[in-house]
Amino acid sequence: MGELTPVPVVLDCDPGHDDMFAILLAAAHPAIDLLAVTTVAGNGTLEAVTLNARKICTAAGLHDMIIAAGADRALNGAQGTAPEIHGESALDGTDLPEPTVPLADDDAVTVMARLLRESPRPVTIAPTGPLTNIATLLDRHPEVKPKIERIVFMGGTTGRGNRHPLAEFNIWADPEAADLVLRSGLPLLMCGLDVTHQAVAGPEVFDRLRAVEGTLPAVLAASLAFYGTTYREIFGMPGPPLHDPVAIAAIAEPEIVRCVEASVVVELIGEHTRGATVVDLYKVTGRPANVQVALELDRERFWDLILDAVAALAGGDG
Ligand code: BDR
Ligand code: CA
């Protein structure tokens, strides 16, 4: 049997501690060909998260990575960041070198449209921040839609939220953008809190991380420790959940998540529920399914993938 061709992927993110691990996993996994890292305001300002993306790629030795900056606010003009979770820099507690990987001249949407047009194969888009760039791409460049294989996003929840009682942060930060993506008719896979809260790093993950040789693993362990503290203080969770790499793992190894098909819509006007993802798990609305919703994660395999990625990139010049 011949080698499988890696899946071309654009990662649209807002690093962010867990976005950082998403970048590392997407860059290192042999089943993924990471075409670009694009950024969107979310965990921090656009300036902060873009600087973080460049620092991460520099530390991991991803010197040729295309990095492009996108939206600095939601479609409706709002700006909601998450300093209580990720710190003011959006990546507090993470000692990374100054970046040498440059920023593309073109903005994220222009770069994504170009990559889609030029790719011989349809491209998978992996948003791990608010969906602003993706909504703008679909709105501004509808002609590239056939070049999108599917959108595998971290966001949403079938139940409780983490930014509001029923709204997960990425969807809460730009509900109009999420609405546009959910109604796009494109194949969608949602990795929401149901599945990402199964990716909580326990003490054994820290031990395994610290056991990998090199500067980068030590920096990552310290970074996770910071992120773990905020999750413990705010949510009472026993460790930090690596939300975003779950979406990447689901692209690299689809069997790592168990999914169900469901209708998913986003609440745009609810007084207490704006940004909530309404997931019709029991098919009570009669609305057609538009999303594959991930519900279960193969935790053991997930952590193996994360640790393998770190080991593979630890030879970078972090
Ligand atoms: C999502 O919000 C951000 O804080 C994380 O990076 C992740 O993408 C989890 O709700
Ligand atoms: Ca994120």
Image (tube, rainbow, N blue to C red):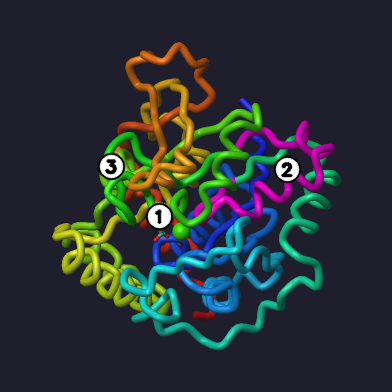
Label 2: which secondary element: helix
Would you call the spot at circle 3 few (<14 residues within 10 Å), some (14-19), or many (20 or more)? some
Please provide percent x and percent y for residue 298. 30, 36
Instruction: Name the residue that disc number 3 marks.
Output: 299
Residue type at tag 2: Leu
Label 1: which secondary element: helix
Instruction: Name the residue that disc number 2 marks.
Output: 138
**Highlighted magenta segment, given as a residue range:** 126-151
Residue type at tag 1: Phe
Q: Is mark 2 within 8 Å of ligand 2?
A: no
Q: Are marks 3 and 1 in contact (CB under 8 Å)?
A: no
Please provide percent x and percent y for residue 157. 35, 40
Q: Earlier in the sequence, mark 3 or mark 1?
A: 1
Residue 249, which numbered label?
A: none
Q: Quadrant of the N terminus?
A: top right
Q: Earlier in the sequence, mark 1 or mark 2?
A: 2
Q: Position of 228 compared to 89: left or right?
A: left
